[in-house]
Amino acid sequence: MAVRKNQATLTAQEKRAFVNAVLALKGNGGYDSFVSTHNDFIISDTDNGERVGHRSPSFLPWHRRFLLQFEEALQAIDPTVTLPYWDWTADRTAGASIWGADFMGGNGRSGDSQVTTGPFAFSTGNWTLNVRADSRSYLRRALGSGVAQLPTRAETSGVLAISTYDAAPWNSASDGFRNNLEGWRGVNLHNRVHVWVGGLMTTGMSPNDPVFWLHHCFIDKLWSEWQRLHPSAGYLPTAGTANVVDLNEVMKPWNNVTPADMLDHSARYTYDTGF
């Protein structure tokens, strides 16, 4: 059973193994397909009129499947690797260990926001952006520039206390746990973290920054914790809802995965601790 760990507790060897697997996936061309998929589903955000990956109830199961697919691609390179998560309620500054030169690398430099430290710096020759909107082929960050503070533990616990998964109109105006976690309502959790990191994380091509996976792994962990706290409150909507993915409808681009398939992750992986 794979156990996803807090990145702050990883050993030096576990960090190296994760970084090396990500670099190998980038090197063999597999990584860029994930960037393209995410970009496709955030730009249009629809498939045949249905909202799929963002601003919709399927935001959480869609990304759970997306993370699993990425984790499986890494494990095809190194079977010991699992996705770590970044608890941004605890590791809240640009000086946190996640931004060390042995792991994600640091902030972007002034002027062009180019990341110049760590394994994903352009100067290493291992991290050239191929899926991009302009000629800049280097990773960019601007930690804390777009918004000053990451979400707090108290703010996150308040969202976890919301007992309804989602509600009409099933979009960025909806009330409920999903939309408050995604960040279009309330204290703004998921979206705020993207803006805090800045650079590529504010675009549809956000997986170009490997911290994307650690951020979304924590979002998945929070969903897992919400499921534990509210066992009788399942995915909504269940059936017959226009323009969104119901419980048993397939999610693009996979065509063989429904939100119902993604509700229980315990056969695939667990997390090291509860929230």
Image (tube, rainbow, N blue to C red):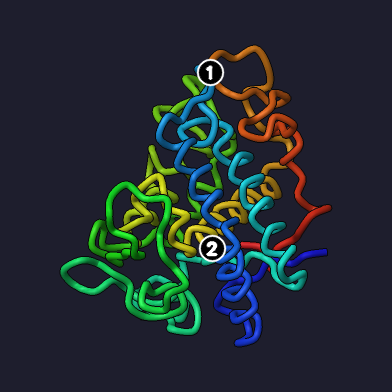
Residue that numbered label 1 is attached to: 48
The local crowd at label 2, few if under 14, some if 14 to 19, many if 20 or more residues have their Cα within 10 Å, is many
First of labels 1, 2 by sequence position = 1
| Vertical arrangement, residue 230 with respect to residue 111, above or below | above
Nearer mark to the viewer, of 1 and 2 = 1
Between the C-alphas of marks 1 and 2, the distance is 30 Å
- Residue projecting furthest to the left: 111
* Place of residue 143 in the rendered image (x, y in percent of width and height, measured from the top left): 30, 67
- Mark 2 falls on what kind of element? helix
| Vertical arrangement, residue 206 with respect to residue 53, above or below | below
Left or right of residue 185, residue 231 in this image: right
| Vertical arrangement, residue 36 with respect to residue 155, above or below | above
Left or right of residue 228, residue 208 in this image: left
- Could you tell me which residue is drawn at 55 percent across and 46 percent down? 161
Are circles 1 and 2 on residues that touch, CB within 8 Å? Answer: no
Q: Identify which residue, 231 or 66, lies in the foreground.
A: 66
Residue that numbered label 2 is attached to: 214
- Mark 1 falls on what kind of element? loop
- Could you tell me which residue is drawn at 40 percent across and 34 percent down? 43
The local crowd at label 1, few if under 14, some if 14 to 19, many if 20 or more residues have their Cα within 10 Å, is few
Q: Amino acid at mark 1?
A: Asn
Left or right of residue 147, residue 246 in this image: right
- Could you tell me which residue is drawn at 79 percent across and 54 percent down? 268
